[in-house]
């Protein structure tokens, strides 16, 4: 259900893009509404009854699904010749240099001045996440905006990479890598691997 919602939202955001076209007809806004309703109903059937809890759980699943898949795909691609190393190191490199989520958006609640720039109250501000890498990678945010799935996403990507490494799988050399047409996500459509 989360996948249906992600696919519907991506296709709605990019009418006529491959995400919708490959399934036949372009998605309609109602497809996203139907997918969201089905996901929320499933969450309620698991015991969540409060609307805020349901919305929070659905939001986490929505935000985590494709972003985690993108982190896995980019980590596997990072194991190509010359960029090998431990899976944990590759995950860290991806998060710092080519994060799956490219930017985050915030709204200025008060007028703010940063250097010579004046940001009026109510303005949308996009924050490039690769620029926020002084300490820990900025990919997962910080403070009240920190991603609750940061640990799970990185563990999944590390373990996925470690299993491929242990079995000798490597990305197919020279493969063309296409990305889903998402405005804020570097999600490889597919990554081909082989065992030499």
Image (cartoon, grey):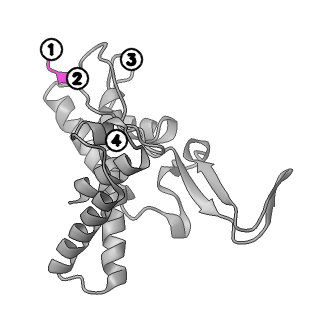
Magenta residues, start to end: 192-196
Asked whether the residues under the numbered discs 2 and 3 touch, taking CB atoms below 8 Å apart as contact, a structural biologist would say no
- Name the image quarter holding residue 51: bottom left
Give the distance between the C-alpha atoms of the residues marked 4 and 3, in whole angstroms. Answer: 21 Å
Q: Residue at x 30, y 36 (%)?
A: 73
Q: Which residue is mark 2?
A: 170
Q: Which residue is mark 1?
A: 196
- Which of disc 2 and disc 1 is earlier in sequence? 2
The answer to whether residue 74 of the structure is visible from this angle is yes
Q: Which residue is mark 3?
A: 82
| Residue 191 lies in the magenta stretch | no
Q: Nearer the viewer, mark 4 or mark 2?
A: 4
Asked whether the residues under the numbered discs 1 and 2 touch, taking CB atoms below 8 Å apart as contact, a structural biologist would say yes
Label 4 residue SS:
helix
For label 3, the crowd category at 10 Å Cα-Cα, with few meaning under 14, some 14 to 19 and many 20 or more, is few
- Which of disc 3 and disc 4 is earlier in sequence? 4
Residue 184 versus residue 23: which sits nearer the camera?
Answer: 23
- Name the image quarter holding residue 63: bottom left
Give the distance between the C-alpha atoms of the residues marked 2 and 3, in whole angstroms. Answer: 12 Å
């Amino acid at each position: 259900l989360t996948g249906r919602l992600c696919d519907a939202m991506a296709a709605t955001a990019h009418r006529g893009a491959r995400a919708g076209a490959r399934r036949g007809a372009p998605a309609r806004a109602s497809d996203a509404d139907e997918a969201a309703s089905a996901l929320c109903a499933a969450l309620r059937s698991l015991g969540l009854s409060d609307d805020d809890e349901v919305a929070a759980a659905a939001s986490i699943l929505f935000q985590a699904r494709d972003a985690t898949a993108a982190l896995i795909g980019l980590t596997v691609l990072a194991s190509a010749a010359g960029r090998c190393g431990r899976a944990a190191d590759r995950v860290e490199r991806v998060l710092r240099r080519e994060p799956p989520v490219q930017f985050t958006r915030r709204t200025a609640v008060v007028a703010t001045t940063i250097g010579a720039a004046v940001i009026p109250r109510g303005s949308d501000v996009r924050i490039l996440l690769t620029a926020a890498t002084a300490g820990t990678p900025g990919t997962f945010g910080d403070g009240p905006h920190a991603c609750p799935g940061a640990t799970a996403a990185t563990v999944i990507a590390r373990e996925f990479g470690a299993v491929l490494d242990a079995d000798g799988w490597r990305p197919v050399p020279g493969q063309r890598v296409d990305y889903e047409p998402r405005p804020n996500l570097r999600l490889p459509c597919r990554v081909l691997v082989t065992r030499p």
